Image (cartoon, rainbow, N blue to C red):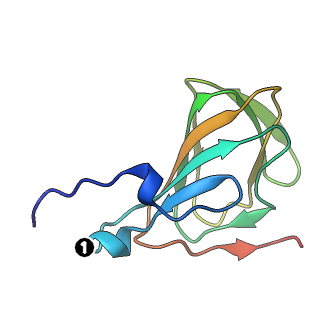
Amino acid sequence: MSIQFVKQIDLPQSEFARTLVGDDYGALRASVIFVNAAPGQGPRLHKHAYAELFFILEGQATVTDGVDERIAGAGEIVIVPPDQPHRFANSGTGPLHQIDVHLNSRFVTEWLEQ
């Protein structure tokens, strides 16, 4: 397998993120979300059958399991174990930049709230 180079700007974009799906790059065993969220933005409560890591680069996020919550800021890493309900939202006044690594070759999400 040869080394691949991908520009974030070329990745599919959602409301507040770009995504790299491992299966699209030779069955890479990870998928990545590049988050660029405005204040208040973030996904609904959900879970995955695999672990997920949030690397917070800039701003702050309030992370919750649906019961308890904690604020995480730049330089922190959030480790979400498999099957753990979670969500995050930009709770700061500026942009939230984080990289979310899903330890799976594709995104598989079970949404827990509408």
Classify residue 18 by image quadrant.
Answer: bottom right
- Point out residue 113 in the picture as x, y percentages from the top left corner: 87, 70
Q: Is residue 54 visible?
A: no
Q: Which residue is mark 1?
A: 26
Residue 71 is left or right of residue 52, and the answer is right
Q: Determine crowd level at label 1: few under 14, some 14-19, many 20+ residues with C-alpha closer than 10 A.
A: few
Residue 26 relative to residue 82: left or right: left
Closer to the camera, 37 or 64?
A: 37
Residue at the location (10% across, 62% down)?
2
* Tag 1: amino acid: Gly
**Considering only vertical position in the picture, is 88 above or below 109?**
above
Query: Which residue corresponds to the image point at 57% horizontal and 75% vertical from the top-left?
Result: 108
Q: Look at the image and tell me whether residue 33 can be seen.
A: yes
Q: Say what secondary structure mark 1 lies in.
A: loop
Q: Position of residue 103 (x, y in %)?
A: 44, 61
User: In the displayed structure, would residue 97 be above or below residue 34?
Assistant: above
Residue at x 81%, y 61% (from the top left corner): 44
Residue nearer the viewer, 60 or 35: 35
Number of labels in the image equals 1
* Left or right of residue 7, residue 100 in this image: right
* Quarter of the rendering containing residue 24: bottom left
Which of these two is toward me, 94 or 23? 94
Please give the name of the residue rendered at 29% of the width and 74% of the height, measured from the top-left corner: 27
- Vertical position of residue 78 compared to residue 84: above or below: above
Quadrant location of the N terminus in the rendered image: bottom left
The C terminus, quarter of image: bottom right
